[in-house]
Amino acid sequence: MTILGIETSCDDTSAAVVSNGTNVLSNVVSSQIKIHKKYGGIVPELASRQHLENINFVIEKAIRDAGCKIQNINAVAVTVGPGLIGSLLVGTTTAQAISNIMKIPVAGINHIEGHIFANFLQPQRTQRKTTENTEKVTPPFVALIVSGGHTDLLMVKNWGNYKILGRTRDDAVGEVFDKIAKFLGLDYPGGPIIDKLAKKGDNKKINFPRPYMPDSWDFSFSGLKTAVINYVNSKHLLAQPPTEVGGYNHSIADLCASFQQSCADVLVRKTVLACEKFNIKKIILGGGVSANSRLRCDFIKKCDEENIKLFMPAAIFCTDNAAMIASAGYFKLKKIARCMAINPSANLELKSWNRGDAEEKGEKVKEK
Ligand code: KG4
Ligand code: ZN
């Protein structure tokens, strides 16, 4: 089954063609970073306008890159939330129009489950790295989704069967990376820049707090953010002259490394504890922050020690992309076997799949 995925929940307009839920035939991502950069964050009104301008071109390119025609597409999968409502609407109305015109089923996908399914994607051969895991992921597993909007710890007992164990009570971890970067005068998005600067710093230099929240599976990173900002102010770090470390001084590199280590310690420990508690021997990661090099290294090391199988998406599928939405759509359509209602919702909760989700009048999905 060949699925066209569409993702417009935030600031990336993306379309992808994926066959059988795993084989990525194309994945086009049109980033709006240049537009939002000068504001230090996403401006919702600008994002939706830009999606409108990009969407047709991006879909056409995805189909062309996949070497197919719209007639070869068997179903459409689109993000229905959570996200910016104006942005979501551009994707959902486009997906619905394609579904109506081509008379093919459409599946509404939660963005978080998209990040989970990023682990099923096989990049095109030319983009593969030898270290990437090509083994098949099967539930049950513990999933950690860490991005600019989410920090969710989940148990996935079976396909589409989700139990949220914990989530952030304040800032998402990626949001904290972005806010600290903005405070330091670094570019947007801050995560990859902090990651890069941290490689030149000492991660033991500053002992920032580790917000473990031991009595809960929830997370809280805003206190850590305040600790970092207070440290910078108390040591007058921003007043120090830049040196050779990417134009920044060594203290900033140490700060980035120490902050990043604090995040990684908390995320790794809580995820591994969840495995122990629920007797699960598999972890999957997803979301933009799962591209973080420190986090990936620490997860590999800890999972090795604890004999836990670890799955991480290829770097290109950690951040927002439509291939992950197409993959989730394939598995969801296979299970529910009917077209679904696609009502966008900014605060969409992650719900388990059941056949009741299917629209009664929906078209039956044919396996091709
Ligand atoms: O998944 P994503 O593309 O969008 C959301 O669903 O939010 O994640 C974007 C987030 C941003 O906060 C960005 O700073 C962060 O992922 N990010 C990183 C890295 N690459 C992206 N954070 C830390 N280290 C990275 N290498
Ligand atoms: Zn995302």
Image (tube, grey):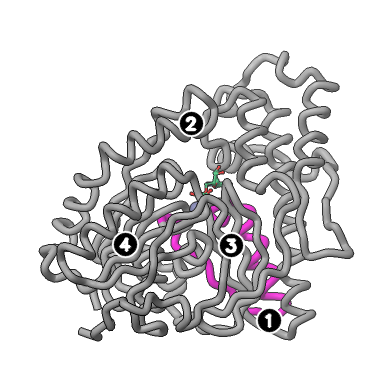
Question: Mark 3 highlights which residue?
Answer: 349
Question: Mark 2 highlights which residue?
Answer: 43
Question: Residue 150 bears which disc, if any?
Answer: none
Q: Which marked residue is nearer to the observer: mark 1 or mark 2?
A: 2
Mark 3 / mark 1, whichever is N-terminal: 1
Q: What kind of residue is marked 2?
A: Val
Q: CA distance from mark 4 to mark 2?
A: 24 Å
Q: Is residue 137 above or below residue 53?
A: below
**Residue that extends furthest to the right in the rendered view of this protein:** 215
Q: Which marked residue is nearer to the observer: mark 3 or mark 1?
A: 3
Q: Is residue 21 above or below residue 28?
A: below
Residue drawn at (40%, 68%) of the image? 130
Query: Is ligand 2 less than 8 Å from the beta carbon at label 4?
Result: no
Question: Residue 307 bears which disc, if any?
Answer: 1
Residue density around tag 4, few if under 14, some if 14–19, many if 20 or more, within 10 Å: many
Tags 3 and 2 touching, CB below 8 Å? no
Q: What kind of residue is marked 1?
A: Asn
Q: CA distance from mark 1 to mark 4?
A: 35 Å
Question: Residue 5 bears which disc, if any?
Answer: 4
Q: CA distance from mark 3 to mark 2?
A: 23 Å
- Across and down, in percent, residue 251 comes to 73, 28
Q: What kind of residue is marked 3?
A: Glu
Q: Which marked residue is nearer to the observer: mark 1 or mark 4?
A: 4
**Was residue 120 drawn as part of the magenta stretch in this picture?**
no
Q: CA distance from mark 4 to mark 3?
A: 20 Å
Residue density around tag 1, few if under 14, some if 14–19, many if 20 or more, within 10 Å: few
